[in-house]
Image (tube, rainbow, N blue to C red):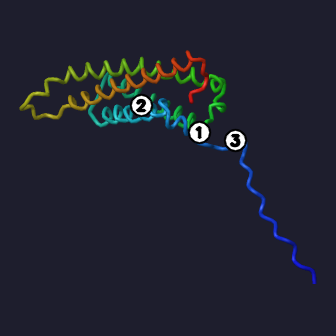
Amino acid sequence: MLPPPPRQPPPQARTARGSLRLQRAFLRGPLGVLRLLQLLAGAAFWITIATSKYQGPVHFALFVSVLFWLLTLGLYFITLLGKQELVPVLGSRWLVVNVAHDLLAAALYGAATGIMIDQTQRHSYCNLKNYRLPCAYHAFLAASVCGGLCLGLYLLSALYGCCRRYQGKEEVV
């Protein structure tokens, strides 16, 4: 009787060429932290607006906040997963795309914050001590603060990206 053939270990699974790996350097770096703060402040901005009674130009502020919240979320996860090369045309210039996104977001958040400040001033009459009717003053005031915070965060990340570009680096991380 012949001995059984030696057992061979199962073949090791090969990692796919396009496997997903977290870019921990981005997660811990300044731009990763700024993106998380932008997402938090942006969510606070649009949730604050959406939960109040709003009309007129506040629709634009809500549009800007939701649009850039979604775009920032997309940029964050694409960069975190290191899949910039999958973005057609723009993937090779990812740092420039990020800076352009941040500058456009800062400009439009500036306009949205201005709208919210104007709406806060228009509703300042209901900040009186004995005013009993429902009013959106406090929601608009909170949204103005969140909008200003978003504006500052996007300007800061644009400045960081410009500094990296000036140093000759072409990568976000």
Front-most of residues 64 and 16: 16
Kind of residue at disc 2: Gln
Residue at the location (27% across, 34% down)?
52
- Report which quarter residue 55 is drawn in: top left
- Report which quarter residue 5 is drawn in: bottom right
Residue at the location (66% across, 31% down)?
85
**Where does the N terminus fall, quadrant-wise?**
bottom right
Front-most of residues 34 and 97: 34
Query: Mark 1 highlights which residue?
Result: 81
How many angstroms separate mark 1 from mark 3 (CA)? 11 Å
Q: Earlier in the sequence, mark 3 or mark 2?
A: 3
Secondary element type, mark 1: helix
Residue 165 as seen in the image, left or right of residue 116:
right
Kind of residue at disc 1: Leu
Q: Residue furthest left?
A: 130
x, y percent for residue 147 = 34, 26
How many angstroms separate mark 3 from mark 2 (CA)? 29 Å
Determine crowd level at label 3: few under 14, some 14-19, many 20+ residues with C-alpha closer than 10 A: few
Query: Mark 3 highlights which residue?
Result: 18
Residue 107 disc label:
none
Kind of residue at disc 3: Gly
Vertical order, 161 against 87 (above or below) = above
How many angstroms separate mark 1 from mark 2 (CA)? 18 Å
Query: Mark 2 highlights which residue?
Result: 38
